[in-house]
Image: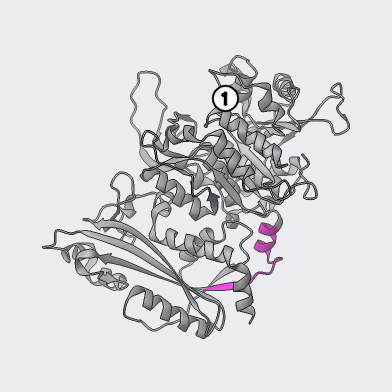
Amino acid sequence: MSSSKEDSNEGGVVIVGSANQDLTAYTPVLPTIGQTVMGTSFITSCGGKGANQAVAAASISASPNGVRMICRVGNDSFGQALLSNFQNVGVTYEKDHVVCEETKYHTGVAPILVDTSSGDNMIVVAPGANYALSPSDIETAILGSSDKNKGPAVVVTQLEIKPESALQALKSGRAVGATTILNPAPAPEDWVMSEEFYQLADIVIPNETELRIICGRPPQDENEEEEEEEGEKNVENEEEIEMAKELLSKGVKRAIIVTLGARGAMIVQRNPDSDGDETKDPIVTFVDAPKDLPCRSEPVVDTVGAGDAFCGSLSAYLSAGLSLEDAATKACGVASMSVRKRGAQTSYPRVEDLPDVLRVGTAAGAAKGEVEKPVISFVTGNKNKLAEVKRILLSSSDVPFDIQSRDIDLPELQGDPLDVAREKCKLAATQINGPVMTEDTSLCFTALNGMPGPYIKWFLEKCGHDGLNNMLTGFDDKSAYAQTVVAFCAGPGKEVHLFDGRTEGMIVRPRGPLDFGWDPIFEPMDGVGGKTYAEMEKEEKDAISHRGRSMAKFRKFLMEEAESICKSIEE
């Protein structure tokens, strides 16, 4: 299917696949069989090839109509963390069917070992609820909510779900006229992909190892690998070209793209002049990240999720109308940026991080000021808070607003957090004389009837972490909830809308870094491993935090009520 805007659907990207909780340990050397090695650090994070690709596609804001994830998770804390993360980054999902209520299905998990010296990794996946995603689930999700004119522009699937489910994703994608992409990862070793997989795929994207496995070739000799220096394109690698041609001949409609790690990618695509003539040789093209990509000089830290960064961003670029070569070149750039940071999803660049060479469409225009959008003033003088809010609210290019900070003085108000937020937003709208959003955070102790509440900052400054703990001396109940109230008003005299996000937890003695406000004394119930906010990685905290939840509600409001909000601003 053509990638031009004239020929593609306008329904964005649908990713059908796995969603896992990654459990990553970093070590100076990967263990051999029977060997125990000591690690240097450990993190939990959201992962799974399907979820990674969805987050990568949504993060760069290239898809004109957003990114939707079709998956299953268990009814457990890992599953809730994954869904919260989707909301925070702007990925939508099937809310009525995503959670698998059968207790035998846990959320998928993936223990990962990362070599800190090279960035190489080893991964084991326990699929759990991923295997509960059935062909009928997928058919209903894609065909039941789409017609051929309004369906997704691109449908992507992988092989961390059952084979029959991945095949159904390709069938349903083809039925609604979408470009269908198969990422055969992990490559099947105990079963063989039928011809139907290839015939239903417009594009197949294996890496070098997966290519050899699905073509029935032995593993590449290690000495051969060492001879290929980082950054070189081995244009003489006739064997890889022949294997890609072999897959193309199985009925793949458009192209085989082989990802080559540091060497970029190889595209073997049908000759547009062949007109069905199989004797005409496919066109072979090698692409790499743009030469002027700023991160090229930075060291490689972690290659986990780089292939998913490529697949996800490629799908978004294709849905935006780029040619296959241009989309693959930019996708190589996104993957290259991802390996300079630790983690999978946490390493993917956001739209505000993208250099101009990786921008496209409305994302590029908005970044350069070419697309004029109504501006909502966020009352804050904290640049880090502004960046976080913009990352959550503007995580896809179809959000028809921009956010800018305004540092203004407002009187200190007292009362219930919701009442305080409402009055503060009214005052700010009057002072700014335009659309405005405010944010108020509280930490509420159950035993103290909600105190210190919105005054937590003052209490922390006066009492410190130990003093806050001492406030509960003599009380058995140490429970508390963290609360963020986002308030929005379209202008002076207009209605104020409130978005309340809460995370339940308990007050504990300080653990973790002490320079993150009251984070060291708050242990959320939704967390994994009994960590305080301060002990969590950023992504792990964002997935369950009170701020993330309130911002997700506000973002949904902006998307659903965009037209009426714009009219109210103009009045």
Give left or right: position of 245 versus 66: right
Residue at the image point whose x is 49% and y is 45% from the top: 97
Q: Tally the marks.
A: 1
The reply to whether residue 335 is in sight is: no
Which residue is at the front of the view, 529 or 224?
529
Which residue is at the front of the view, 258 or 434?
434
Instruction: Give how far across and how far down residue 562 sits, in percent.
Output: 61, 68
In the picture, which quadrant includes the N terminus?
A: top right
Residue at the image point whose x is 32% and y is 50% from the top: 535
Instruction: Give how far across and how far down residue 398 sits, in percent.
Output: 64, 59
Magenta stretch in the rendered image: 362-377
Residue at the image point whose x is 40% and y is 75% from the top: 421
Give left or right: position of 454 versus 549: left
Q: Would you call the spot at circle 1 few (<14 residues within 10 Å), some (14-19), or many (20 or more)?
A: many
| Residue identifier under label 1 | 187
State the SS at label 1: loop
Q: Amino acid at mark 1?
A: Ala
- List the single residue furthest toward the left: 474
- Please tell me whether residue 559 belongs to the stretch shown in magenta: no
